[in-house]
Image (spheres, helix red, strand yellow):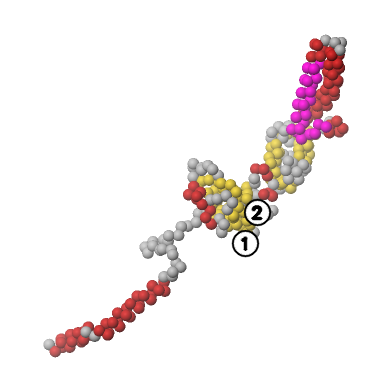
């Protein structure tokens, strides 16, 4: 019995000591408060799921796209008249200026068209003079009304033929007035409508090209654009005029500027996407149509960049 009484007395004394109990409680409270003070920051507003580790911050969407040429800076060179390629000095990638000769064609119909214009012009001068003469005779009652009407019909018919020949020559890029002094040209010159680089060349010397068949394309890279693909969930945050920063793969960290200029008005039924177009402020000779690109969503377009990558590499 004596051995059992001693431990009980010690426990009772410890439990009855108020100062020790208070000190133990204060130490415990201090240990509980300290880790919370170190781990929780007033500036940290994100909430983390203790089980999955997910946060309440949404991931930014990205848009895919490509570098494109505006329609007004792209020219498909098609032939207004068929013919055999006589001269050709083009290579893909060659830079040409507006008005420069791309190729020359030979076609007997081209010679015939010039002859029709010159003949109709010469006959029109005679018929016009005859018509005026018949008018004068009719007023003096020295000629019949039938001759006046026939003269007028012949004059107007030849005038329409000459106007048709002029219109056809203009379609071929020929100034009819130059034929009077220079005479008939045996070949047709195909000229560049814009300045730019040759691409998609479809001709060679001696090849016969039909009317409407493409000769080549000319691309003007002075005002490149970015065509992006967004999704309907991002449309609310997109605004025209939003500034963009983008980078080109292979040019290091050099940054270019641009802005959103157009948002499509029709959503694709298949993938629920919509097209966006952005213009670029700067330009580079290293830009190529067809480069793939991606950018951040519209909420961060004024802070993030568009990164362009060469899909062929």
300 and 228: which is toward the camera: 300
Q: x and y percent of residue 164 in the render?
A: 75, 26
Question: Left or right: 307 with respect to 128?
Answer: left
Q: Is residue 86 above or below residue 18?
A: above
Looking at the rendering, which quadrant does residue 46 occupy? Answer: bottom left
Q: Which residues are magenta?
A: 151-177
Q: x and y percent of residue 75 in the render?
A: 69, 41
Q: x and y percent of residue 108 in the render?
A: 78, 29
Q: Describe the element under mark 1 as helix, strand or loop.
A: loop
Looking at the rendering, which quadrant does residue 137 occupy? Answer: top right
Q: Which residue is mark 1?
A: 253
Indicate which disc residue 261 carries. Answer: none
Q: Describe the element under mark 2 as helix, strand or loop.
A: loop
Quick one: which residue is furthest to the bottom in this view? 2
Q: Is residue 3 above or below residue 120?
A: below
Indicate which disc residue 281 carries. Answer: 2
Magenta region includes residue 242: no
Q: Earlier in the sequence, mark 1 or mark 2?
A: 1
Q: x and y percent of residue 169 in the render?
A: 77, 31
Looking at the rendering, which quadrant does residue 8 occupy? Answer: bottom left
Question: Left or right: 131 with respect to 212?
Answer: right
Quick one: which residue is furthest to the front in this view? 140
Q: Is residue 67 above or below residue 25?
A: above
Q: Residue at x 83, y 18 (%)?
A: 131
Question: Left or right: 138 with respect to 43?
Answer: right
Quarter of the rendering occupied by the N terminus: bottom left
Local crowd at mark 2 within 10 Å, few (<14), some, or many (≥20)?
Answer: few
Instruction: For marks 1 and 2, give the CA distance.
Output: 17 Å
């Amino acid at each position: 019995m004596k051995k059992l009484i001693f431990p009980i007395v010690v426990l009772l004394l410890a439990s009855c000591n108020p100062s020790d109990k208070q000190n133990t409680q204060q130490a415990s409270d201090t240990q509980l408060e300290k880790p919370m003070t170190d781990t929780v920051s007033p500036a940290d507003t994100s909430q983390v799921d203790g089980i999955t580790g997910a946060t309440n911050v949404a991931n930014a969407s990205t848009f895919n796209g490509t570098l494109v040429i505006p329609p007004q800076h792209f020219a498909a060179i098609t032939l207004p008249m068929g013919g055999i390629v006589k001269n050709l000095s083009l290579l893909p990638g060659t830079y040409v200026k507006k008005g420069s000769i791309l190729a020359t064609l030979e076609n007997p119909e081209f010679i015939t068209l010039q002859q029709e214009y010159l003949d109709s012009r010469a006959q029109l001068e005679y018929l016009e003079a005859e018509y005026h003469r018949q008018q004068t005779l009719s007023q003096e009652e020295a000629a019949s009304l039938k001759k006046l009407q026939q003269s007028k019909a012949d004059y107007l018919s030849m005038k329409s033929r000459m106007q048709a020949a002029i219109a056809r020559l203009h379609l071929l890029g020929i100034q009819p007035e130059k034929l009077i002094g220079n005479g008939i040209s045996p070949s047709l010159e195909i000229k560049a409508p814009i300045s730019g680089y040759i691409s998609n060349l479809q001709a060679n010397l001696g090849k016969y090209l039909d009317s409407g068949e493409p000769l080549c394309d000319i691309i003007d890279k002075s005002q490149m654009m970015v065509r992006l693909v967004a999704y309907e969930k991002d449309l609310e945050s997109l605004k025209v005029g939003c500034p963009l920063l983008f980078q080109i793969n292979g040019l290091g960290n050099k940054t270019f500027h641009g802005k959103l200029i157009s948002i499509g008005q029709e959503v694709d039924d298949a993938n629920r996407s919509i097209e966006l177009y952005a213009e670029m402020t700067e330009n580079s000779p290293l830009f190529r149509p067809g480069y793939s690109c991606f950018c951040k969503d519209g909420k961060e377009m004024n802070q993030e960049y568009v990164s362009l990558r060469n899909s062929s590499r």
